[in-house]
Structures are given as C-alpha cells and as structure tokens.
Amino acid sequence: MMLGFLLARAGIEVVVLEKHADFLRDFRGDTIHPSTLEVMYELGILEEFLRRPHQELPRIGAQIEDFTVPIADFSHLPTDCKFIALMRQWDFLNFIAEKGKLYAEFHLRMESEVTDLIEENERIVGVQSKTPQGGLKVRADLTVGADGRHSVVRKRAGLEVIDRGAPIDVLWMRISRQPSDVNQALGRFRAGRILVTIDRGDYWQCAFVIPKGAFDQIKQKGLPEFREEIATVAPLFRGRVDELRDWNDIKLLSVAVDHLRQWSRAGLLCIGDAAHAMSPIGGVGINLAIQDAVAAAKFLAEPLRHGAVTDEQLAKVHRRREFPTSMTQEFQVFAHKRFIGPALTDKTPITRLPLPLRLLQQFPVLRRIPARVVGLGIRPEHVHTRDAHIDSASANC
C-alpha cells in the first residue's frame, strides 16, 4: 500500500490488489515506530495521520517478576515524533489507501486474490488473480510481491527462502481494559511465562508466548488452566480471563524468521514479509516493510517513469535493505536463544535482575540505545520521490 501510494504520487500508474473485501483483520502488527512516523512527516501527512485513533508511547518497559524495568525512552530521538504510535492496522491501511486515491494513477482493487504470475521470455510481466466477477489478469512493467510470510508471489516465482528458525509461537487474544489500567505496553515475565500487552483503548491486545508447536498441548490441558496461566503472569487480568469463552477467542501466530536469498528476478520484486518474515520481537515487522517501500520507490520511480526496470535496479533495492534486515534478524535470533527461550523453560522466580537490566534501571541515559535501535532501526530511509502533481501544477502556473 505504501509503495503504491509513493509511486502514484510520483506520477506512475499503480494497481494494488487486496485479497479481502476490507482490512479488518485483528491481531496484526500495529506498532508504528518513529521511523515510520518520520516518513509520514516527510510526506506532509503526519498531522492528519495522528488524528486517527491511536495511543502514544514515549517510553516502554517490562515487568519481570516483581521488578519494573524501563527499557527504552524515545523522547531523545532526532525525529518529529518521539514516541511509538499504537494504531489498528486497518486504520493505517485505510489512511494510506485514502491518500493514494487522491492520485488518478492509484488503483486499489479489493477482493482480488493473486493466484499466479504471468511469465514471458523468463520475465514476470504481471499476475493472474481471481475476483467475485471472475478471473483478472494485470500486466505490469514491475510486479511487487508484498503478500506476507506465506507469499504466493515468492512461491510462484521460485525464490529460495532461507529459514533462520524460531523456537516460539504466539497466542493472540483480547482482554477488556479498565480505565485504571496503566497506559503502557509491557512485556510481562513471570515463572516461565511471557505475556505482551498492547493498549487498544478499550481493550488489551495480548500476546502469550509459547514454545514452538505447543498449542495443541495447551489445548489438551483445557481452557481453565490456560486462563490461570494468563492470570498468573498478569494478575490485573484475574477477574477478566473468563472473557476467553472458548478456543475460538485465541488465535495462533506461527512465528517465522526467514528471508529470500534473492528478493527479485526479472520484472519482479518482493518486499516486507514476502522478502523477510520477522519475529514479533520489537514490533519491527511493519516498520521494516515501510522502509522497504520507501527505498524501492527511491530506486525505481524514475526507471518506471520511463517504462523499464532493469535487474540491476531491482538488485539495488535488495542490497540497500539487506543489511538492516539481516542485522535485525540476527538480533531476533539472538534474543530467541539467549532470552526468550530460557525465559520460557526456567520456572525459577527471579530474585535479582541481570546486570544489563539493572543498568537500565539505574542509568536513564542507557535507555536511549534500545530506543534508537527499536524506534529508528538500522539505516532508516527517507522520502526522495517527488510529488509529480505538485511539480506539474507549479510548471503550469
């Protein structure tokens, strides 16, 4: 959606195909980091964007047993917005779609599920999709696969996936929020249990971390025991866990950390989770996808304006984004092995915090480091594509 908006803004004809009739899927990533908010600022749409329902987190922390640990302080970032914005992903997507539709070059087709690629002379020249009205073929100078970790596009293109492995899965659910609840997203660690809570305004979106493949075993133990697990790690929910009436109220996210060996082939580019599936750690997935889109627009807008994109120009996008992606995944794999995995298996209550966490407690300046890593990431992108419509209007004055 973001790449389509940026390219249409640059005067390039774009068709965005969305499988569903709307964007209303719950339990999607919704942490909009300062790096993404800075992109909005550079596009001149930040003020309007922040009028949409959202919560702002200038700081984040964790509850480890009975210790409250401040982790990151975003108030010192060199950005216009010094906070993480929590916004429902459908609100985010609807906003970008509305901005895109202001340009005649932007075409959004809902209920259009891509089923295959169109290939001619070893070059991808478009896609085949199915709609309620029947089959639809879309031919294009460039096809972009942004269809997630189970990407049909990358599978049909035969692009090789490198699996980094992930020892965890996540169970998503919602629990009502009381006015007296603390307005802060926290990771909660207690006796081998991990729960992340995201403030949605009138409810908490909760992520309960489990060992990979353990969901069936948890269900066999029964829903009452699972409710007790939630209440143990987050005692404020003890009177609310009965809101989880059956297993349909709990959704499984099978966590993957992987990336494509090559993000492109002739006429085709993959970005976002289609190019690199991320762990939920740090909530960085959506923001890396946005960075991919900004970089792709920067390198490809001018070639597309002239109707031809070379393999080398597509490879530039990969090379630009490979380092920040691989470094982020290295950190996630490290965190899985050294922190998350042991935290799930060690049931011994912590009586003393590890040294790094004690340092974060004692020296506020150190909280700027994780804030920069999470909030800005490695090699943040900036908007370089011009608004061709403003330039055209200026030329006609």
Image (cartoon, rainbow, N blue to C red):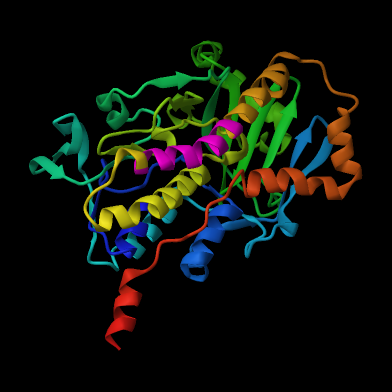
Foreground of the two, 59 or 54? 59
Residue 305 position within the rendered picture, expressed as x and y whole percent measured from the top left: 26, 58
Foreground of the two, 11 or 146? 11
69 lies left or right of 42: right
Q: In the rendered structure, does residue 72 fall within the stretch colored magenta?
A: no
Residue 100 position within the rendered picture, expressed as x and y whole percent measured from the top left: 32, 62
> From which residue to which does the magenta span run?
313-327
Asked if residue 396 is positioned above or below residue 274 in the image, the reply reads: below
Magenta stretch secondary structure, dominant: helix
Residue at 26% in and 27% down: 157
Q: Is residue 8 visible?
A: yes
241 lies left or right of 133: right
How many labels sit on residues?
0
Residue at 71% in and 33% down: 188
Asked if residue 45 is positioned above or below residue 124 in the image, the reply reads: below
Q: Is residue 246 visible?
A: no
Image quarter in which the C terminus is found: bottom left
Residue 391 position within the rendered picture, expressed as x and y whole percent measured from the top left: 34, 76
Residue 20 position within the rendered picture, expressed as x and y whole percent measured from the top left: 27, 42
352 lies left or right of 195: right
Foreground of the two, 65 or 309? 309
The residue furthest bottom is: 397
